[in-house]
Image (cartoon, grey):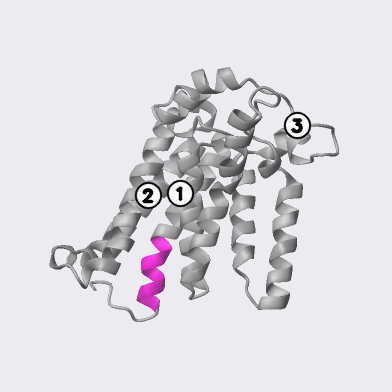
Amino acid sequence: MFFFFHLLVGVATGLFLSEVLRSRRWFLPVAVGSILPDLIDKPLGHIIFAETIGNGRIIGHSLIFLVIILILAFFQWKYRGSLLCFGVGIGVLLHQVLDSMWKIPKTWYFPLYGPFPMGDYHAYFSGSFWRELTSPQEWLAVVLLICIGVLFLGEWFSGSRASLSFIPRIRWPCMTALGMVTIGTGIFVLIRLESIGSSLLYPVVSGGDPVICALALIWCGFVFLLLPLLHLSRGDDLSE
């Protein structure tokens, strides 16, 4: 999967945990964890060790990295009573699942099968990097992230800026609409999976395993639909 799609799934999961556990402190760790493997591995594999490794999926995409994060999370919880590092671990796990890392056992199970597989950093910058920038999957993720950012961050500033006072009134209807579109796209991909290669929606799921991408879209859509329902069940005024 591509960078912003990873971030979209992390943001959706962070919102879900923040609402269910009634603590916004979960949001940022999960969102950061969902892109942390790429933030570590892309500079290491494609820039610092480009000529010796040339691979953007190395230590951050391995199970040993996830285990280290979870060990740190355990000690943070034991000695500081905080579960936030577990949020980072959840984000990292999401990233590795979206990338189907079990299909690259030399990386996922490192160091059991020897060193990381070699890549070609010239091919990355001439092909993969450009394909990521122009991918409809990334465009969709960026649009959804911008919408979520405006709807949630805009509410925080709406009290001090009169021009943003309308955002709290439209947030939940807009989230419902985003949820319906996103979950509908994921379901359509699953229904048309056998012929997805010839479908107009294929570019939206071409950044990885189409099944995992479709399930990720359904998950994001489910979260976007769930948030208004949670607030409604708590007696919140959805028009505010």
Per the image, the residue denoted by label 3 is 116
Tell me the distance, in whole angstroms, between the alpha carbons under discs 2 and 3. Answer: 33 Å
Residue 218 in view in this figure: no
Per the image, the residue denoted by label 2 is 145
Which amino acid, by three-letter code, is at mark 2? Leu
Other residues around mark 3 within 10 Å, as few (<14) / some (14–19) / many (≥20): many
**Residue 231 within the segment the image draws in magenta:** yes
Please report the bounds of the magenta region as a residue range.
225-233
Per the image, the residue denoted by label 1 is 8
Residue 72 appears in which quarter of the rendering? bottom right
Q: Secondary structure at mark 1?
A: helix
Q: Nearer the viewer, mark 3 or mark 1?
A: 3
Q: Nearer the viewer, residue 16 or 150?
A: 150
Tell me the distance, in whole angstroms, between the alpha carbons under discs 3 and 1. Answer: 28 Å
Drawn side of residue 167 relative to residue 129, left or right: left
**Residue 138 within the segment the image draws in magenta:** no
Quadrant where the C terminus sits is bottom left
Residue appearing at x 46%, y 52% in the figure: 220
Residue appearing at x 74%, y 40% in the figure: 108
Residue appearing at x 74%, y 36% in the figure: 107
Where is 41 relative to 149, above or below? above
Which amino acid, by three-letter code, is at mark 3? Phe
Magenta part mainly helix, strand or loop? helix
Q: Are marks 2 and 1 in contact (CB under 8 Å)?
A: yes
Quadrant where the N terminus sits is top right
Which amino acid, by three-letter code, is at mark 1? Leu
